[in-house]
Image: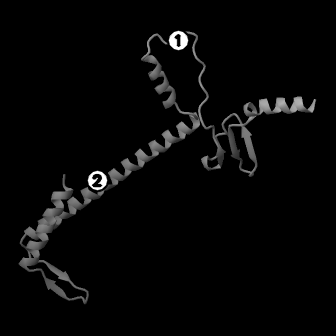
Amino acid sequence: MAAALLLVTLVLQPAAQAQYVWKDSKGQMHASDQPPPRDVADKDVVKRPSAPRPAATPAAAPASSSAAPVARLQAASAPVDPELAQRRARADQEAKARAQADAQRVAAQQAENCQRARTHLATLESGTRLVRVNAQGERIVVDDAVRIREAAEARSVMASDCR
């Protein structure tokens, strides 16, 4: 009797093994053939199924031999875990949103730099006497060499940022 029970247990054991193993918020381990609840973080999922279960085959076989590789390709590209696919899609959307926000921030900075360079170039080309105050509080008159150098710098900034 015990040998028969052992034999039945050994035969049925692979089918009874859980595919998902995760730790809940209280630290308890859970095992199931169903995915963990949505509130369980990815880092708490200890084990996932290694391969997707084969889909039920339809009664009729595909008409052409070229349809079989296409069906295999579609089955291979199908996500194993729909929740994981949703999380990846959400992460991709967040990354795109961050990239777009960064691009807008850079564009705003370039527009500001462009406006400052235009104003500075207009001041340099106005011909009025320019005076700067140094660290000691002394007034220094900007000569023509400095004026020409700063005008060239302003033009290069305008060339790169004013588009």
Within 10 Å of disc 2 (Cα), the crowding (few <14, some 14-19, many 20+) is some
- Return the x and y of residue 133 as percentages of the image width and height: 21, 83
As helix, strand or loop, the secondary structure at mark 1 comes to: loop
Camera-nearest residue between 11 and 98: 11
Horizontally, residue 29 falls left or right of residue 140, namely right
Identity, as a three-letter code, of the amino acid under mark 1: Ala
Q: Tell me if 33 is positioned left or right of 120 in this view.
A: right
Question: Which residue sits at x=58%, y=37%?
Answer: 83
Q: Mark 2 or mark 1: which is in front?
A: 1
* Quarter of the rendering containing residue 138: bottom left
Judge by depth and name the residue closer to the eye, 94 or 43.
43
Place of residue 123 in the rendered image (x, y in percent of width and height, measured from the top left): 13, 69
Looking at the image, residue 139 lies above or below residue 157: below
- Residue tagged by mark 2? 107
Q: Label 2 sits on what residue type?
A: Ala
SS for callout 2: helix
Residue extending furthest toward the right: 1
Q: Which residue: 70% across, 34% down? A: 33
| Structural crowding at the residue carrying mark 1, measured as other residues with C-alpha within 10 Å and reported as few (<14), some (14–19) or many (≥20) | few
